[in-house]
Every structure is written in structure tokens, then in C-alpha cells.
Amino acid sequence: MFKRTAWILLAAVAGLLALSARADYQPAAEKVVDNVYAIVGPLGQRSAGNDGLNANYGFVVTSTGVILIDSGASRLGAEKLAAAIRKVTRQPVRWVITTGSQDHRWLGNDHFAGEGAEVIALSRTAATQAEYANQQMQGLERFLGERLKGTRPLPATTALAGDSATLELGGVTLELAYTHAHYPGDARVWLPQQRVVFSGDLVYVDRLLGVLPWSSVKNGQQAFKALAALKPARIVPGHGRVCDLAQAQREAGDYYDFLADKVGTAARDMEPLAETLDRYADLPQFRHLENYGDLHRANMNRAFTEFESQ
Ligand SMILES: [Zn+2]
């Protein structure tokens, strides 16, 4: 009898261990093309289990080192990204390029800089990182708790002037250009040789994109058109699985168009806000996207405010 109880207890403990192992998210790299990899994070919210890695990252292995695109939300998150890279190559991370100033894009910078990497961004991206650092550390603390310890915000130390910049790192060409969509100073990274674009938080697929009080739908629409004009073969979006242009168009581009053309026009025509939000409350073409129920109305509201003031 005792034996049986012991077995049941053991099974229960094993079950609990399996559950907590799942909660402890470990990022894994997937090949996009050649030496270009993506790390696709979970679609849900930041948590202690995922160390704030609820976004996408990427890296390029060159003959002289690894180029990492975005560095994670914390020191522990950065260490997890480093471990995922080590499973692919023994090359060190020599360069970190950050596409944005939202927490999970850059709060791992300090970790990689400590290992000898150069941390690069367009100048407005770096400036916005410095500007939002305190706010983001406070916000993250609520989600990550103890696991945020040891994280030191380090805005990009190599700040590139101009509206765009071309880098040659380890024989790989990378073109950075602003999108200014989700956060001011957000950018995308285009690899013309591989025809791969890391969109940063301009493109979301599988989940609805979020419009924050400081986001710009107008910039998002323009930047998406510019990205489409590149005719990328593969897109590593800010959130969601690696995709082609057609999917990005359907799930992000068309949504920017909807917000700018329908909600924006209603705002400029001074139609009542509530009526506009009600009219477009249910959009079947976007309903399947995760977070639609939580974000769609607030997104329209913010788009309305943006276009109303123009
Ligand atoms: Zn994001």
C-alpha cells in the first residue's frame, strides 16, 4: 500500500517538473536561408518563464563572427539567446544590431557588450532606448521579478547617423532604415544578398500588431510599402513565424491600410469616434489573429487620435 502511494507521489512530482520545464522557455534557432537564422519567440506576454523573450531575434553567422539582431529583454534572456546561438556555431557574437527601443529588443545589450560585442543602431533608435530605459525596466519588473536582476540598460554605443545606413560585417551586407512605426526610431534590417528582411516591430504575423500611444500608423503604412518594394524572399517579423511577403501583407500590411485608410479617413472627416469604432468592430479577415479581441479596438482608437490631429 505504501509502495503504491509512493509511486503516485513520484508520478505527481514528475508531472510538476515537466510542467515547470515547459514554462522555462528555451529559445531555439531555425535556419532561414544560408547562414541566416531566426529565433521565433512565443506570442504571449512577457513572463519569468520566457525571460521577456516574447519577440523574434535573428543572427547571421559570418567567417569572422556572429551578427545578432536584437538582444533580448534582460541579462538572463540574453544568456538564453547566446546559448541558442552556441548550438549553431562556436563563433562569438561580435556585433549586435538593435532594431528598436522596446524592452525585448535591446535590454540584453549589456550582456553581449560585456562579451566583447559592438552594439550598433541607427542614432534615433539609440536615443529612444536611452529615453525609455527607466519606464521599461519598471514595466518589466512586474513581469520578470527577480529574474530581471543584473540587467543594466545599455543603449547602442555605435549610433549611425542618417536616415539609413549600410554595414559590411564579416563580408555580409546589411541595410538599416527607419520605420518609426511601433516606437519612434524603430528600424528594419535588410540583407540584400540573401533577400531576407528582419522587420523589427513593423510586421507582426500570427498575432495582431499593437498600436501604442507613441506608435504611428501613418509611418507603419509607409514603411510597410517600402518593405514590400524590396520584394523580400523571407521576412523575419517582429512577432510570429518567419513568413513570405504575401502573409505579411495580409496580416500586417492590410491592417495598416485599414487603420490609415478607413479609421484615419473617418478621423480626418471628423466623424464621431464611437460610431467609427463600432462600424469596424468586427473584421473577419483579421479575426483569426491572436490578441485580436484584446487589441483591435484600442488600435483603432489610437489610429483615430493620430489622424485626427493631422
Ligand atoms: Zn515587440
Image (tube, rainbow, N blue to C red):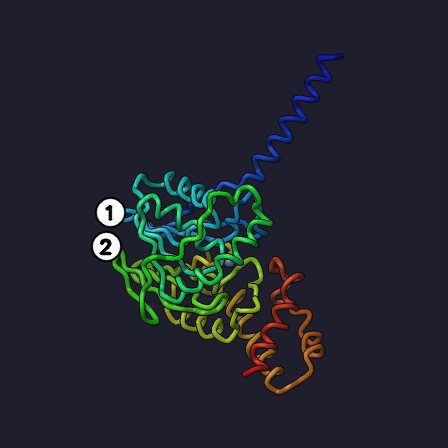
The residue indicated by pointer 1 is 64
| SS type, badge 2 | loop
Image-based side of 195 in relation to 3, left or right: left
> Can residue 34 be seen at all in this image of the molecule?
no
Residue lying at the far bottom of the rendered structure: 269
| SS type, badge 1 | loop
Percent x, y of residue 37: 38, 49
Is 190 located above or below residue 67 in the figure? Answer: below
**Quadrant assignment for the C terminus:** bottom right
Disc 2 to disc 1, how far (Cα)? 9 Å
Q: Residue at x 36, y 51 (%)?
A: 68
Q: CB of residue at label 2: within 8 Å of ligand 1? A: no
Image-based side of 198 in relation to 65, left or right: right
Q: Amino acid at mark 1?
A: Thr
Residue 273 location, quadrant: bottom right
Is 202 located above or below residue 219 in the figure? Answer: above
Is 287 located above or below residue 269 in the figure? Answer: above
Q: CB of residue at label 1: within 8 Å of ligand 1? A: no
Image-based side of 274 in relation to 180, left or right: right
> Can residue 108 be seen at all in this image of the molecule?
yes
Percent x, y of residue 92: 31, 43
Density class for disc 2 (Cα within 10 Å; few <14, some 14-19, many ≥20) is few
The residue indicated by pointer 2 is 171
Residue lying at the far right of the rendered structure: 1
Say whether marks 2 and 1 touch (CB < 8 Å).
yes
Q: Residue at x 69, y 17 (%)?
A: 6
Percent x, y of residue 131: 46, 63
